């Protein structure tokens, strides 16, 4: 059944709780598919665990639960303008899960939910030249990759090409602003376009953007400042960088001249994260502040990046598998029965002030956390 007007949950781009304006009625009900228990809680806890904990350690169960959660909720809007980038990221995760689980009904439901992205007149779409608007193109590109839809491919490439409509003199997109989350917003869109077309221009755009940003923001310890004027190692900000590098390197041609430097910076970051992981398997809201609270969206992003790094042969499996699995176990314990991940920092602007980051609200079910948890579930399902 086609959707009527887009339901709306608006979110302040710099944080705050979402507010429902109109509710969309709809749900998708399916039985989670059976899968090998790759990560039983018993394996990591050294003690007895209940059946529910074991189930929540199953990536297929978690992926199905989070996908149903996404389909049952209202759209998440960026301010009053367009679909929020966090939902775009979650949509890609759910689509990838549907493919990994061979679940045609789920894939069809997701394609239907995001059909309005094909219409530039839809309230879900903004063509404003801004990284947070452009990244919406990753959704139609993912649909094109999975279904072969030429209509979705054309729309996704429209977002990717518009990002380079008026490049700067240095060859970067004019959407450049030197925030660390830009690396995902630009890198992921362009590498998705490369995956969908094989056109090396898209891979080159992604690589050039990363190669310009990385030395500006990465410190000698391997971590990244939120921005040059916000010298704070914010957890999720570093998560966006980690995922951007991992996603781009997963598809960037081996012969690309910028690949070696990006690989070195990715490996330095991954190594820097290892001693900062808490005993609960989680990383902190500010990474180098052990007294800050454990934050789940960053944790899922780091574990996912490690999974991609291992899969691509860029990280030592013996060194990174344990931390990655401890992260999964810690994250699974933060999921409720409805598939809402707890301890997620709300959307956050930049400040040169540690107290600002310490005092950011923590919520459950925010798509900033749901998205990387979906990516991570799929990564574990792909693991041999």
Image: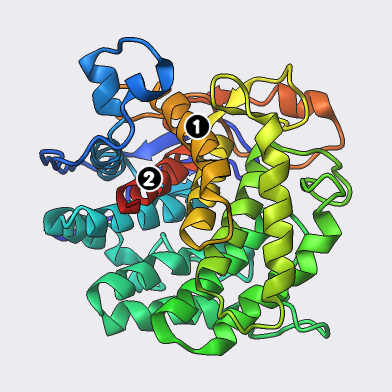
Horizontally, residue 32 falls left or right of residue 354, namely: left
- Is 109 rendered above or below residue 172? above
Near-viewer residue (73 or 374): 374
Horizontally, residue 225 falls left or right of residue 277, namely: right
Please give the label number shown on residue 327. 1
Q: Secondary structure at mark 1?
A: helix
Question: Is the image coloured rainbow, by chain, by secondary structure, or in one colour?
Answer: rainbow
Please state the horizontal and vertical placement of residue 211, each as a whole percent of the image: 75, 70
Alpha-carbon span between mark 2 and mark 1: 14 Å
Horizontally, residue 117 falls left or right of residue 273, namely: left
Please give the label number shown on residue 374. 2
Q: Secondary structure at mark 2?
A: helix
Near-viewer residue (302 or 179): 302
Determine which quarter of the picture holds residue 244. Answer: bottom right
Q: Earlier in the sequence, mark 2 or mark 1?
A: 1
Q: How many marks?
A: 2
CA neighbours of label 1 inside 10 A, class few (<14), some (14 to 19), many (20+): many
Q: Residue at x 49, y 47 (%)?
A: 304
CA neighbours of label 2 inside 10 A, class few (<14), some (14 to 19), many (20+): many
Please state the horizontal and vertical placement of residue 246, each as a whole percent of the image: 56, 59
Near-viewer residue (242 or 164): 242
């Amino acid at each position: 059944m086609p959707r009527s007007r887009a339901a709306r949950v608006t979110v302040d781009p710099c944080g705050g709780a979402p507010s429902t304006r109109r509710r969309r009625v709809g749900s998708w009900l399916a039985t989670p598919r059976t899968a090998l228990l790759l990560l039983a809680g018993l394996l990591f806890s050294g003690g007895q665990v209940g059946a529910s904990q074991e189930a929540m350690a199953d990536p297929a169960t978690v992926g199905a639960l989070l996908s149903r959660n996404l389909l049952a909720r209202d759209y998440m809007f960026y301010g009053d303008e367009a679909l929020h980038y966090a939902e775009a990221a979650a949509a890609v995760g759910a689509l990838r899960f549907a493919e990994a689980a061979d679940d045609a009904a789920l894939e069809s439901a997701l394609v239907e939910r995001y059909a309005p992205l094909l219409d530039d007149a839809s309230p879900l779409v903004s063509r404003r030249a801004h990284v947070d608007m452009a990244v919406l193109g990753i959704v139609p590109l993912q649909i094109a990759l999975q279904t072969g839809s030429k209509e979705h491919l054309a729309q996704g490439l429209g977002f990717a090409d518009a990002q380079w409509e008026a490049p700067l003199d240095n060859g970067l997109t004019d959407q450049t602003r030197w925030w660390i989350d830009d690396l995902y917003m630009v890198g992921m869109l362009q590498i998705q376009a490369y995956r969908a077309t094989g056109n090396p221009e898209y891979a080159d755009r992604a690589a050039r953007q990363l190669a310009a940003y990385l030395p500006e923001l990465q410190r000698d310890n391997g971590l990244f400042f939120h921005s040059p004027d916000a010298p704070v190692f914010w957890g999720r900000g570093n998560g966006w960088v980690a995922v951007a590098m991992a996603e781009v390197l997963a598809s960037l041609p081996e012969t690309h001249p910028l690949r070696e430097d990006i690989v070195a910076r990715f490996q330095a970051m991954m190594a820097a994260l290892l001693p900062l992981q808490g005993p609960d398997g989680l990383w902190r809201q500010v990474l180098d502040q052990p007294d800050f609270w454990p934050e789940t969206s960053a944790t899922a992003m780091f574990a996912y990046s490690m999974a991609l790094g291992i899969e691509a042969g860029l990280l030592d499996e013996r060194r990174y598998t344990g931390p990655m699995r401890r992260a999964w176990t810690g994250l699974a314990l933060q999921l409720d029965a409805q598939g809402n991940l707890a301890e997620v920092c709300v959307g956050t602007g930049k400040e040169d002030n540690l107290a600002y980051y310490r005092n950011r609200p923590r919520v459950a079910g925010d798509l900033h956390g749901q998205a990387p948890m979906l990516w991570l579930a799929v990564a574990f399902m792909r693991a041999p």
